[in-house]
Amino acid sequence: MVQQLEDENPGIYNDSSKTFIDLYMKSGLYITEVVKRLYNSEIIKSEIPNDHERLKHILENQVYGLAPTEIIYRIATSFIFSELTEGISQKNFAQLDAYPYAEAGTLEEKLDEVFK
C-alpha cells in the first residue's frame, strides 16, 4: 500500500507538508512505513536536517491514525512511538472506530472534531 502510493504519486514522500492517515489502525505498521519513507527522504532531510526534529515534525504534523479499540490503540501507538520518540506528541492518534462514521457519511466532520 505504501509503495502503491509512491507509484501513483511519485515524490509523495518528499513533501513535508503532505499528510497521511490510517483510518483503521491495527498494528501501526502502515503508519510506521509512511514515517520511514518521509524520514529517509533526502528532500525532507535537507529541510529538517536534525534527526529528532525531523521525526517530531513527521509524527506531529504529517501522520494521523485511528484505532477501533483501546487495546489496538495501545498496541499501535506503542509500535509507532518507541523510546526514540520521547517528547513527541501523540495528539494525531486516537481511539475511535471510524467505520460507523464512514458508513453514515459523517467521517469528515468527526475527523475535524477529533483532530481540531
Image (cartoon, helix red, strand yellow):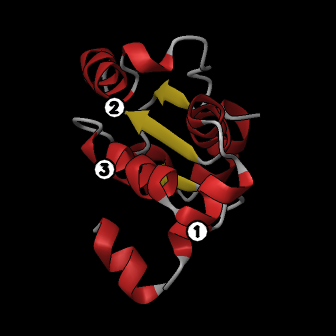
Q: Nearer the viewer, mark 2 or mark 1?
A: 1
Disc 1 element: helix
Tell me: 99 left or right of 111.
Answer: left
At label 1, the amino acid type is Asn
Tell me: 3 left or right of 9.
Answer: left
Q: Which residue is mark 1?
A: 14
Instruction: Please say if 66 is above or below 71.
Output: below
Marks 1 and 3, the one that precedes in the sequence: 1
Marks 2 and 1, the one that precedes in the sequence: 1
At label 2, the amino acid type is Pro
**Residue at left offset 44%, top offset 43%:** 98
Q: Is residue 14 among what the camera can see?
A: yes
**Which quarter shows the N terminus?**
bottom left
Marks 2 and 3, the one that precedes in the sequence: 3
Disc 2 element: loop
Marks 2 and 3, how far apart at CA: 15 Å
**Mark 2, other Cα within 10 Å: few <14 / some 14–19 / many ≥20:** some
Instruction: Please say if 51 is above or below 102.
Output: above
**Residue at left offset 72%, top offset 59%:** 17
Residue 19 coordinates in the image, percent (x, y): 61, 56
Q: Nearer the viewer, mark 2 or mark 3?
A: 3
**Mark 1, other Cα within 10 Å: few <14 / some 14–19 / many ≥20:** some
Residue 27 coordinates in the image, percent (x, y): 22, 35
**Residue at left offset 40%, top offset 75%:** 5
Q: Nearer the viewer, mark 1 or mark 3?
A: 1
Marks 1 and 3, how far apart at CA: 17 Å
Q: Name the foreground residue: 28 vs 25.
A: 28
Instruction: Please say if 76 is above or below 103.
Output: above
Q: Which residue is mark 2?
A: 68
